[in-house]
Amino acid sequence: MKQYVLAVLTLALCVGGVEMVSTVNRGRARVEGKQLLPGRDNWDFVGHALKSDLTTLVLALKQRNTDDLTQLFWSVSDPLSARYGKFLSLEEVKEIVQPHPQDIKDIMVWLHHYNVDSCSLIETRDFLKCRVTVGVAEQLLETNFGYFQHSVQKDNVIIRATQEYTVPKRIASKLDFIGGVHRLPNVESKLKIKQTMPLPDDLSAFRYGVHPDTLRKRYNVSDNVATNANNSQATAQFLKQFYSAGDLTKFMSHFGKGFPHLNKISHEVGPNSGKAGLEANLDVQYIMSLGANVSTTFWSTGGLNKGQEPFLEWLLDLSNTSQIPHIFSVSYGDHERTLSAEFMNRINLEFQKIGVRGVSVLFASGDDGAGCHRFEDESYTFEPDFPSSSPFVTTVGGTMFTAVFSDVNEKGNDISGGGFSNIFSMPKYQMETVSGYLNSSVKGLPDSKYYNSSNRAYPDVSAMSDDFWIIIDRLLMNVAGTSAATPTVAGLIALANDARLNAGKPVLGFLNPFIYQNPDIFFDVTLGPPSSACWLDDLEGYPLSEGWDPVTGFGTPDYHRLVAAAMKY
Ligand SMILES: *[C@@H]1O[C@H](CO)[C@@H](O)[C@H](O)[C@H]1NC(C)=O
Ligand SMILES: *[C@@H]1O[C@H](CO)[C@@H](O)[C@H](O)[C@H]1NC(C)=O
Ligand SMILES: *[C@@H]1O[C@H](CO)[C@@H](O)[C@H](O)[C@H]1NC(C)=O
Ligand SMILES: *[C@@H]1O[C@H](CO)[C@@H](O)[C@H](O)[C@H]1NC(C)=O
Ligand SMILES: *[C@@H]1O[C@H](CO)[C@@H](O)[C@H](O)[C@H]1NC(C)=O
Ligand SMILES: *[C@@H]1O[C@H](CO)[C@@H](O)[C@H](O)[C@H]1NC(C)=O
C-alpha cells in the first residue's frame, strides 16, 4: 500500500519544459490537464517571488452555448449560407456566451474569501482579471511563484508559478484555464535581418528586393487604394513592439510615390513609446502600403508588466470593446506541444467570438517550415504551431521570387510554416482540398508518422516573405519571414472589403470558407524546395504541388480576381 502511494506521488519530469504529473489533494483539482511549467525557451528561474509583489491572474470562466456560437460562426462566414455576412454585435455575443450568473457569483465568493476584490469582468463576462499579491495567489492556487528572466532580453522579468496549480473542485469545473500562472510569452522576433544600410537620398533607381511597388505590381494592385471611410484594418503587437511614426512617414515619402496613402496611423490602442520594433515597423509600413488609404489601428498590449500574458490581454481587450477594426494582422505563435488543450480550445472560442462579429484575423504561419521536435529518445517529429494551426483563423505562409532580379515568378520559401495540427480535427471547408493534395501523385510526401493528416492543415494562403525593405531608426533594413507576408495579405483583404463596403455589402469576416470556395483568386505557387524540418536528420518537410499545399496554401493573391470573387456574394 505504502509503495503504491509512493509510486503515485512520483513526479514525472520531462526535459525541455518540465511537465509534472502528480496527484492532487482531495477536494482540489487541476483546471488544465497538462501543465508545462516555466523554465524553457530562454526563460531562467532567478529566485522566489516576494509575497508582497503584485501579479495578474486572468480567470477564463466557462462559457455557455458554445455550440450555438460555433454554428453561428460557420453560418455568417460561409458564402453559401443564408446568414452570410449577418454579423453579431458584441452585445449579442455576450448574450450567447456569458457564464451563468451563479457561476460568476461562486467564483467571486471564493476569491472574496481570500480578500481578493480588485477584479474586473470584461463585457462578455467570460474573463475575470484580478490583481493579487503573490502571497494570495499562492494560497488561491496552492503553488509557489518565482521570477523568470529572459536570457537575452534581461530587462524582461516576469512572475510565474514554479509548480502545478490547483483550485477547489467546485471552482475547477467553472473554469477553462487561469492565465498568468504558467505560460511564458514568446518575446523574440523571428524576423531575419539580412542587411542594414544608411537611407540613400534617392530610391528611384532602387530595384533590388521587395518594396510596396514590387508587391503592388506582382499582385496586380497597381495604384488602387481604399476609398470607403468606414473601412479599417489593424496590426496587433505584443511585448514592447512599438512602431515609429517618424519612420512610417519617411517610409511613405520614399516608397509611397506610386499610390495615394495615409502617412499616419489613425488610432493607437494601448501604449506606444520607446524604441521602434522591427516587427511593428514592418507591419505598419506594409499593411498601409497594400491596404493603402485604409484607416489603420496600431493595437498594442505594450509593456511586459510582471505577470501578464500579452496575447491573452489582446483577446480580452477585443471582447471588451464594441467597435473593433475589420481586419487584424498578427505575427505571434507558440508550439502546440507547449500549450494545454483546454487553453487552445478556449482561444479557439475567442477567435469564433471575433469572427462572428465580422472580423478577419490573419496569423503568420511561422518561420520553421514543418518544424522539428526531438524527443528524449532522439526520435523526432514535425512541430505545428498555435494559433497558426487553429481552424478559426486564416494562416499566411511565405514565398519569394525565383531569382533576385525577377519580380514576377514566385517559389515557396522553405521556412514557410505549415503542416497539420496534432490537436484540431480538419474543418469541413478544407477537407476536399487537402485530401486532393494527400491523394495526388505529389512526389516526396513525408512519412505519415511525422504528422496527423486527419487534422487542420495550414497555411491557407501566402505572399512574398523575403527581402522586404523597411525603415527603422532612419536606416534601411532588409528583412525576411512570414511576418512580412501577413500584413501584405491583410492589406489586400482590406481592399476587397473596400469594394464590398462601397457596394453597401458587409465585410468578408472570417475568410477561410470564402478562400476555399474560390481557389482561383490565387497565383498558384508550385516551384521551390520542400519546406524545412529536421535538417540535422536530413528530414525534409512538405513538397509544393499544383493547387493547395502545406507550404504556400493556395498561393498568392491576385487583386482583380480577389475583388471580383468578393463581389459575387
Ligand atoms: C473593460 O472595459 C471597462 C470600460 O469599458 C473597464 O472598466 C474594465 O476595466 C475593462 N476590463 C478589463 C478586464 O480590462
Ligand atoms: C496580373 O499579374 C500577372 C502576373 O504578374 C500578369 O501576367 C497579368 O497580366 C496581370 N493582370 C492584370 C489584369 O494586370
Ligand atoms: C481616401 O479615403 C477617403 C475616405 O476615408 C476618401 O474620401 C478619399 O477620397 C480617399 N482618397 C483617395 C485618393 O482615393
Ligand atoms: C458608414 O457606416 C454608417 C453606419 O453603418 C453608414 O450609415 C454610412 O452610410 C457608411 N458610410 C459609407 C461611406 O459607406
Ligand atoms: C490524429 O488527431 C485526431 C484528432 O483530430 C486524434 O483523434 C487521433 O488519435 C490522431 N491520430 C494519431 C495517429 O495521433
Ligand atoms: C482521397 O482519398 C480518400 C481515401 O482513399 C477518399 O475518401 C477521398 O474522397 C479522396 N479525395 C479526393 C479529393 O480525391
Image: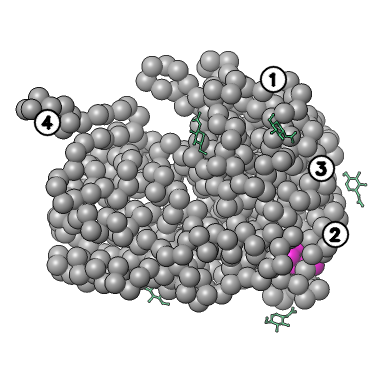
Residue occupying image coordinates x 85% and y 54%: 561
How much space separates mark 4 and mark 2, taking CA atoms?
67 Å
Task: Give the quarter of the figure containing the N terminus.
Answer: top left
Q: Mark 3 = which residue?
A: 523
Amino acid type of the residue that numbered disc 3 sits on in the rendered structure: Phe
Amino acid type of the residue that numbered disc 4 sits on in the rendered structure: Val
Q: Does the magenta-highlighted stretch encompass residue 259?
A: no
How much space separates mark 1 and mark 3, taking CA atoms?
23 Å
- Establish whether ligand 2 lies closer than 8 Å to the Cβ of label 3: yes
33 w.r.t. 19: above or below = below
Circles 1 and 3, Cβ within 8 Å, touching? The answer is no
266 w.r.t. 195: above or below = below
**Residue 444's disc number:** 1
Marked residue nearer the N-terminal end (1 or 2): 1
Front disc: 4 or 2: 4
Front disc: 3 or 2: 2
Q: Looking at the picture, tell me which residue is in the foreground, 431 or 185.
A: 431
How much space separates mark 4 and mark 3, taking CA atoms?
62 Å
Front disc: 4 or 3: 4
Q: How many marks?
A: 4
- Classify mark 1: helix, strand or loop: loop
How much space separates mark 1 and mark 2, taking CA atoms?
36 Å
Marked residue nearer the N-terminal end (3 or 2): 3
How much space separates mark 3 and mark 2, taking CA atoms?
15 Å
How much space separates mark 1 and mark 4, taking CA atoms?
50 Å
Q: Mark 2 = which residue?
A: 564
The stretch in magenta equals 494-499
Q: How is the image coloured?
A: one colour
**Residue 5's disc number:** 4
- Classify mark 3: helix, strand or loop: strand
Number of other residues with Cα within 10 Å of mark 3, as a class: few under 14, some 14 to 19, many 20 or more: many
